[in-house]
Image (spheres, grey):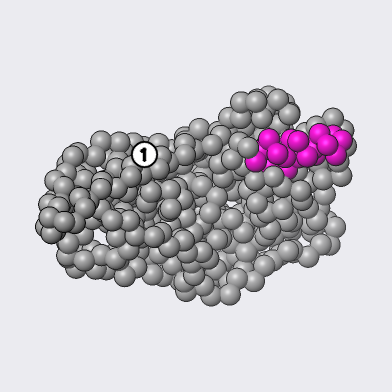
Amino acid sequence: MRYRPARISCINMTDNGHMPMWSHLARSGGDDGIAISIPCRYKRNLMVGTRAAMQSYPSDWALVDVETSGFRPSEHRVLSIALLTIGADGQVTGEFSSLLNPGCDPGPVHVHGLTAQRLAGSPRFEQIASDVATFLDKRVMVAHNARFDYDFLAQEFARAGQRLPVDQRLCTLALNRRLSPPTPNMRLGTLAAHYGVVQRRAHDAADDTRVLAGVLRGSLAAAARLGLSLPLVPCPPREAVPRTRYPARVPKAACAHRNPGRLTAGGPLVQGMKVAITGDTRRDRAELTAQATTAGLNMMSTVSRHTSVLVTNVPGSATAKMRRARTEGIPIIDEATFLRLLQDVRPGVLHEPMSAPRSAPALQAPPPPHQIRPATPLSGRRVLVLGGSHPRAAATRARVTELGGAAAVNLSNSVTDVVLLPGGEADRRMPRIQSLVLPVHEESWLDAPTSAPPAEHGTTPKPRLAIRAS
């Protein structure tokens, strides 16, 4: 974590004689601040242009980028955060960045590169919330696809029991849609190249914030030339983020084993243990409960002193189950640990059969529980099919459903993938799909769908570029 003032220095020109503003923003190794390196012969013109653009939109800016474990703020967590503050005169005034321990699985490591091992030992969000608030307070929050970053921060602040101090936000994606620069798409890296900013490490929060500073500067200059107003979005106070959905109630199943007591640290699950779950789960709650019941665990809807273990992905939450678990000293584990322990549940002790009159028929053993269906290749994916004849498109959608996905007809907020049939590339929605960086596949992809789109297509979606409005 860092917070330092900025300084400006001059350097020689690059080999091609061009060095755009902000593109060489770099962290100083000392304590005297961030070094913004500017070619001497262009320093005066550059600073004049920046000052003119900033004076057209006088604000203090807080540039933000977050890397997350998924797409949904109510379920997933922030893994890293970076902020860069810029004054109304265009000067960088401070910098802050930190990795975070989310207390859950980090999600798509192939996208952000943040493994659980790398995040281990990092602070939790509630430990840095006050520092983040200091950077955001009384400034306009700026991000690329700002609604995504804002919603995740609002959720994290709510979990920490604090208010997100943001009154307005500016989305550079929305601003550039007004500017309509001659770029093939509106991705951050594409706009960075257009405005002459060098992107060194995509999906790195600190570098993305540095790049965002260059994109903001170029965008403000272009907007000032055109006399455009900024698409500032008011952000009313959000003291708490309500849960938008509740897990379906799962019918209670009888357990044939005695309760062996509480889960011990580093120990295994034992048949008969009483297990409760609180908060959102990445896996469907009903499937998770059914798998645990099949393994011989006693799944409970409440927490008591007899509970063996509580499963949650948000150990800092204030649910009734969590409060009771803390009061009773119940062991608490996350979903990933629970799933791992489910692979080796130790045998328990069966309940003694109830005594009955000799004339009564013997009790029959309960039928074996149903096997849980394995995860399907497109589970959790919503696929839009474009092109092709009506019968062929209908057959393709049916194939998507067979693979466990949901077939979409319209380009909506929930679409995760696009499959092109012959003629689909001419669909009027393709420019929008490309600007949103949605994965686009050929029909053959359905023969062996991968968990993530191939990197060579250049469409691997970063969580911050999912479909959402700002």
Q: Please tell me which residue is depicted at 36% across the width and 39% down the height of the picture.
A: 116
Q: Amino acid at mark 1?
A: Ala
Residue 224 appears in which quarter of the rendering?
A: bottom right
Residue 14 lies left or right of residue 70; in this view the side is right
Q: Is residue 245 above or below residue 467?
A: below
Q: Which residue appears at 56% of the width and 45% of the height?
A: 380
Q: Let me know if residue 24 appears in the view.
A: no
Decide if residue 468 is on the left or right side of residue 120: right
Q: In the image, what residue occupies the spot 55% across and 61% down?
A: 151
Q: Which residue is mark 1?
A: 116
The one nearer the camera, 439 or 304, is 304
Q: Which residues are magenta?
A: 382-401
Whether residue 390 is in magenta: the answer is yes
Q: Is residue 95 magenta?
A: no
The chief SS type of the magenta part is helix
Q: Nearer the viewer, residue 134 or 398?
A: 398
Q: Residue at x 43, y 38 (%)?
A: 114
- Name the secondary structure under disc 1: helix
Residue 176 image offset from top left, x and y in percent: 76, 52
| Residue at the extreme front of the image, as rendered | 359
Q: Position of residue 410 (x, y in %)?
A: 77, 50
Residue 355 vs residue 175: left or right? left
Question: Residue 309 at what x, y percent from top left?
Answer: 23, 54
**Which one is in front, 459 or 166?**
459
Q: Is residue 49 above or below residue 24?
A: below
